[in-house]
Each structure stands twice: as structure tokens, then as C-alpha cells.
Image (cartoon, rainbow, N blue to C red):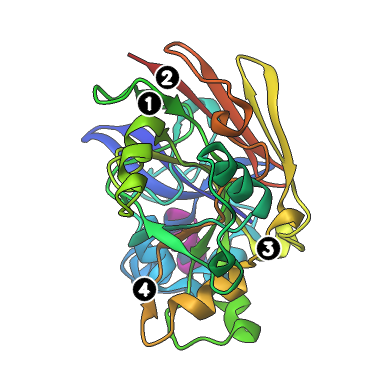
Amino acid sequence: MKLCTFEVETSIGRLRRTGVVDARGIVDVNFACAWRLSEEGEPRPYRLAEVLAPDNMREFLEGWTTSLEQTRRSLACPLPQTGSRGERILYDPREVRLCAPVPHPASLRDFVAVEQHVKAGFARRGEPMPPEWYEIPVYYKSGHQNILGPGEDVRWPSFTERFDYELELAAVIGVAGRDVPAEAARAHIAGFLVMNDFSARDIQKKEMKVRLGPAKGKDWATALGPVLVTLDEIADPYNLRMTATINGELWSDGNSRDMYWKFEQMIEFLTRDDRILPGDVIGSGTVGTGCGLELDRWVKPGDVMELEIEKIGVLRNRVIR
């Protein structure tokens, strides 16, 4: 299933809704559920649908198991374009704007799980690969309040002269947990999406010299999208081709198989005496060759970045200044 958050114009202004992208277009999961419940004879279909298939992604994830099952049941029906109250159930994708699938993550933690990328970064700083990297999966916390979606422009921040993209696979948590062993961690993942971890490299370099961060060099913006693809459609998240093109030119070409640390190991480490929550986003870190820093090539104002991961789609953003 390809879940999305979409924005649509209504009589009371623009609203964001939870949807599914399928052969029919974009299905409003909340209204589809209400229509199905009404057809089944439920006397309060709209009120019940608010609980079973919420119209916003955070609440949808909080009720993940129920939300997913109810949505699957609704999608199996021959849905009409409008419901009994005139509400739209089906949309042509050209009628709406796709937003970040998870516009307001509960948290955003980004790991550095790909050896090739980490080695390249330390080599550029003239430092050896630290042995500790092979002992624990390390991460930093990024700005979960500064999320962009597909097609949105990203502003070049005033405090940097070295803007960079970073091609990453990200997992979204659908089931809360504490002290989760790696062998049970897959059941806590709702699905995967593409992540562009924008970086201010000159600021990041200064932060790292004082052994603190990255912070300001990262948390000013992150793009997520274009859709949240559930596990059943991914099958193997560790064999996905990952590419990045800048203005149509291929810059990055890697594969998620190169992840030294797997998401299951990340979740086990994260949840030691701690919790993961529905709506948490966990980044893989940059795939090999997946950023300008490794290539010594840098994006400029006006450049269009298109990050693509097999079976998920293309996350497109333009840099503006």
C-alpha cells in the first residue's frame, strides 16, 4: 500500500488528508471507510471512521494495525467518487498536492549506517575510521518540525555557503515499543520512504570540530516522500537501488544492501531503556556516493534534486535562494 498525505481545496480552505495512491487515483481513506461502514449498516459511520481510519497521518499511525486493516477492507470495495454527504472519496492526482507523507513526525533520528559514506567523510577530514562505529549504530536527532514534502522548494539557508543533499532510506514507526529485540523489530515498522537530509556542510564541519552535533548544520530542513510504502510492497528493504539526479544528471547511484547496520539493529539500540512511538522517522544515513560531499560536487540555487528509491518513488525538490 502506498500511503500519502494530500492537500485539497475545500469550501472552508485547504485541508490535509490521509490517502492511498492506487490505480483509481488517490483514495481518501477516512471517507472511504465511512462510506463502507454506512453500506454495512453502521448507524454512525462518520464518527466511527474518525477512530478506525483517521484523516491525519499521525493518528493513522497511532492506530496502525486497526487503521491498516480498515483501509484494506475499504480499498477492496468498488468505491464511488463521492459519499452520501457529497464528500470526495476519489481524486485524480492532478486535483491535489502531495505533502510529506508524515508531515509532523514524532521524532526524526538519523543514523550513519553505510560504511562507504562514513569512510569517505572521515577521509575528507584526514581522520581514520573510528573502530567504535562498528560497535554500536550511532545517530543524531534532527529537526522534526522542519519537514518538506515532494515538489516543495527548499530555501538556501542564510548561514551557509555549502548546501548539500543526502540520499537516504527512512523507516516510519507504526507500533510503539520499548526494549525491542532486533528479531522482533520488523513488526514495529509501518513502512519506508525517501529522505533528503539537507546539510549545511560548512556549519556541520565547525560543529564536528568541537565534537558536538551535527545540529544547526542539519535540522533546518528535511524532505520526506513521495509516499509511505508498507512493508508488504517492499519485501526486502535491503536490496533497493537508490539514485540522485541533479538537473537530470545522475550524481549518485547506490543500493540499500550496503547498509552495515540494519533498521532492526537500530530499533533494538534505540529502545534500550527507551521507547519508539508511532510517527517516529528513522533515517538510514547517506548511501554510498549519495551526497555532494563524497563527490566534491555542490548544488546551487535553482538546481532540482530528484532522489529515487526503487519501489518507493521519486522525491523532487528545488533549491531557491
Q: Are marks 1 and 3 in contact (CB under 8 Å)?
A: no
Q: Which residue is mark 3?
A: 260
Q: Callout 1, which amino acid?
A: Val
| Image point (49%, 49%), residue name | 19
Region rendered in magenta: 31-37
Q: Which residue is mark 1?
A: 154
Q: Mark 3: few, some, or many residues within 10 Å (few <14, many ≥20)?
A: some
Instruction: Tell whether 237 sits left or right of 141.
Output: right
Q: Callout 2, which amino acid?
A: Val
Residue 206 visible at all: yes
Residue situated furthest left in the rendering: 12
- Tell me the SS state at disc 4: loop
Q: Are marks 1 and 2 in contact (CB under 8 Å)?
A: yes
Q: Which residue is mark 4?
A: 43
Q: Which residue is mark 2?
A: 319
Q: Callout 4, which amino acid?
A: Pro
